[in-house]
């Protein structure tokens, strides 16, 4: 019960940080992922295709944040229901 409520709150907080791009969380996440998965060439310059891909990935991460918020609300509601039914 308590685990479901705390998990729901964790999902909501993390999802809100991604969805609102709080302090550039989504942008930093994408920059880190691009360095690991697809490093920039030797010249260190990015192409327009890389910039478009980066902007699309940021939109994807923000949409994923909204999904995390919705799942967090479901988990929080379920945990609260379990808590209320056993009290």
Image (cartoon, rainbow, N blue to C red):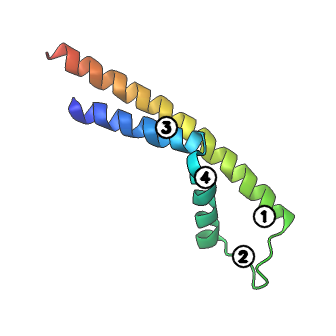
> Is 44 located above or below residue 78 in the figure?
below
Outermost residue toward the bottom in this view: 42
For label 4, the SS is helix
The residue singled out by tag 1 in the image is: 50
Q: Which residue lies furthest to the front in this view?
A: 23
Q: Mark 4 points at which residue?
A: 24
Q: Can you identify the residue that label 2 sits on?
A: 40
Check if mark 4's residue and mark 1's residue have beta carbons within 8 Å: no
Q: In this view, does 86 lie to the left or right of 78?
A: left
Q: How far apart are marks 3 and 1 (CA)?
A: 26 Å
How far apart, in angstroms, are the residues tagged by discs 4 and 1?
Answer: 18 Å
* Quadrant position of the N terminus in the picture: top left
**Above or below, 57 relative to 75:** below
In this rendering, the count of numbered labels is: 4
Q: Residue at x 56, y 52 (%)?
A: 25
Give how far apart the Cα atoms at labels 2 and 3 are. 30 Å
Secondary structure state at the residue bearing disc 1: helix
Which of pointers 2 and 3 lies earlier in the amino acid sequence?
Answer: 2
Spatial distance from mark 1 to mark 2, Cα to Cα? 9 Å
């Amino acid at each position: 019960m308590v685990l479901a409520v705390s998990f729901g709150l964790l999902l909501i907080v993390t999802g809100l940080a991604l969805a609102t791009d709080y302090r550039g969380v989504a942008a930093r996440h994408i920059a880190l992922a691009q360095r690991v998965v697809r490093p920039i060439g030797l010249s260190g310059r990015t192409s327009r295709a890389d910039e478009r891909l980066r902007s699309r990935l940021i939109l994807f991460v923000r949409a994923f944040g909204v999904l995390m918020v919705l799942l967090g609300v479901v988990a929080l509601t379920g945990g609260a229901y379990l808590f209320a039914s056993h009290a």
